[in-house]
Image (spheres, rainbow, N blue to C red):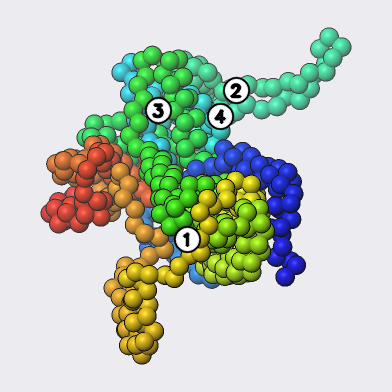
Amino acid sequence: MAQLRISTWGIQNPVPVSIIFIALVLFGVVSYMKLPIKQRPNVTFPAVTITITENGAAPSEMETQITRPIENAMAGLPNVETIQSTVTRGVSVTQIEFPLNVDMQKMTDDVRTRVDQTRVQLPRDIDPPTVTRVDIDSEAILTYAVAAPRMSNVDLSWFIDDTVSRTLQGEQGVAQVQRVGGIDREINVIVDPDKMAAFGVTAPQINNALFNQSLDASGGEVEVGGRRQTLRVLGTPDTIAKLRETQIPLGAGRYVRLSDVAEVGDGSSEIQGFARLDDRPVVAFQVMKTRDASDVSTEDNVDRAIKRLEAQHPGVTFTKVLSTVDNTRQNFAATEHTLLEGMVLAAIVVFLFLRDWRATLITAVAMPVSLIPTFASMVLFGFSLNTITLLALTLVIGILVDDAIVEIENIQKRVDAGARPYRAALEGADAIGLAVVATTFTIVTVFFPVSFMPGIPGQFFKEFGLTVSVAVMFSLLTARLLTPLMAAYFLKPSPHPHERGPLKGPYRVALEWALEHRWLSIIGGGLIFVASLMLIGVLPKGVQPEGNPNYYYLDLEGPPGATPAAMDQLVREVTQLVKQRPETEHVFATVGQTSGGGFFSGTASSMSEGAVTVVIKGGRRPSVAKIRDLLRPALMTIPTPG
């Protein structure tokens, strides 16, 4: 049993033990300040998505000319598990799933290479294919609506794309800023067929002249003043007036100006989508964070940057529509309160049994001393403070105090019998050492394998199992070193030594009855076990429990080819219906392609599709699941737009 006499060494060497635990606590506190606060752990979905768009193409054409060649090219990749495609008007989305253990960066590069090789088989009119990894952390965490009465819709859209995006992307944790709603600026050239015929100008000639005019190129190097300098040829006009003066060659040395055959003006692109906030047209933007960044710190950085933008641009107003970080903050605060409440309640229960404030204090110290160093290991493993790890820390509070209770109770028993605290700590800690070690490793044996569960759920429980196991091991270290040390030097001798009497009370009566009626006890326990197994079938199933955030989403889908006016009417009806609910605070709706080159939340692929985000007021309210159940029958009464 020499290996279990570590408590004796700790009692006889209080200075090294004190330094060890002070260092562990300091490392834990520093690590706690560095841990990112997130909604969920880092989970990698082994899937890559290929999105190809072609304006106006029918679904049948998209399938035969784009989807099938892409699927045939992807079928030759190694480690492919499934290939699934979704084809709608003008959009083809192909998703390739791989095993969990593959290198997703390499697989993404391989998919991109195959798409480039297949490009020659695809129609020439398609937009550049987009290859992206499926990443749940790429979802938007913040949505802002921007209002500027002195700006036009085009100017406000450019302000968001240029000024706001550049400012926010410089903040730590921000990965992307995507505009929602608004329109892009375009220089419109409207040709006059009659004037073109009169001057003998063709459309290709105008197109070639505009292409050559909008070209900046390198002009090589020249020697000026004894030094060689780079020369650039700038052909792009910087004003509309210069663009109107563009010369169109007609042959035989003849030219005609662009303004002679066309009208050139500053305009906007065709509306491909729109956004509404509480039934009002708005231009908004969403903020996506980087994978490893903290949700809370990223939101704080963005909020500070928004305040600076408002100060620099007095005529612009930013309104925060939605923040998914609010739910993360609430979960984190609730867990902190639960941890503190658990520690206090555990200390109270220990006091009720031991009836000694010194012994209770020693047990209470063991909980934070075991918990705080766990944060250092979480930083080492690359974990974060998320729903899973916070659940693990909350669960482990009751386990952390077990080892300390066993140690201090065995020592206190000897002190009550008349032994000096120093001698009682030496004898009591080593006498119970094997049981404490066996109990701790039993708990680790249960939770540690959870970290190696296969599949997507295994990625969630990796942080859970390791966090619990590490915290329990720190609990063992505290119980075998710090608890006996504090008992030896902090406890006081008992003024009235006495031996503890036998256990009495209702528990003893129930225990004696169970021992006298063994078969009845076994049958009763077996029936309870079988009944518990039968209840498993009625429990809801899912990767994680359904939350109750302060928002929920609705998907809109109109018929193929729906017009903006029809979808706008649909949005108005849905908004009016949702606003009738007393708990609704804001209704934010988007339809179609709502950002320059991008799609809102990756869902809206045409003018016939959209999404509605409903923000709920704080305070007492029905759950999100109940609100959806109440809205579903009413939503079915809204006619599909024609």
Specify which label sits upstream in the sequence, 1 or 4: 1
**Distance Cα–Cα, label 4 vs label 3:** 19 Å
| Image location (x, y in percent) of residue 257 | 48, 20
Please name whichever residue, 426 or 371, is drawn nearer the observer in this view of the structure: 426
Task: Find out whether the residues at labels 2 and 3 contact each other: C-beta distance under 8 Å.
Answer: no
The type of residue carrying mark 1 is Thr
Disc ID at residue 157: 3
Specify which label sits upstream in the sequence, 2 or 1: 1
**Distance Cα–Cα, label 1 vs label 4:** 33 Å
The type of residue carrying mark 2 is Gly
Residue at the spot of label 2: 235
Q: Could you say whether the residue bearing mark 1 is in a helix, strand or loop?
A: strand
The type of residue carrying mark 4 is Gly
Q: Could you say whether the residue bearing mark 4 is in a helix, strand or loop?
A: loop
Dot in front, 2 or 1: 1
Please name whichever residue, 255 or 239, is drawn nearer the observer in this view of the structure: 239
Q: Could you say whether the residue bearing mark 3 is in a helix, strand or loop?
A: helix
Specify which label sits upstream in the sequence, 2 or 3: 3
Where 413 sits versus 635, above or below? below
Dot in front, 4 or 2: 4
**Distance Cα–Cα, label 2 vs label 1:** 41 Å
Disc ID at residue 58: none
Please name whichever residue, 501 or 358, is drawn nearer the observer in this view of the structure: 501
Q: Is residue 122 left or right of residue 352?
A: right
Residue at the spot of label 1: 94
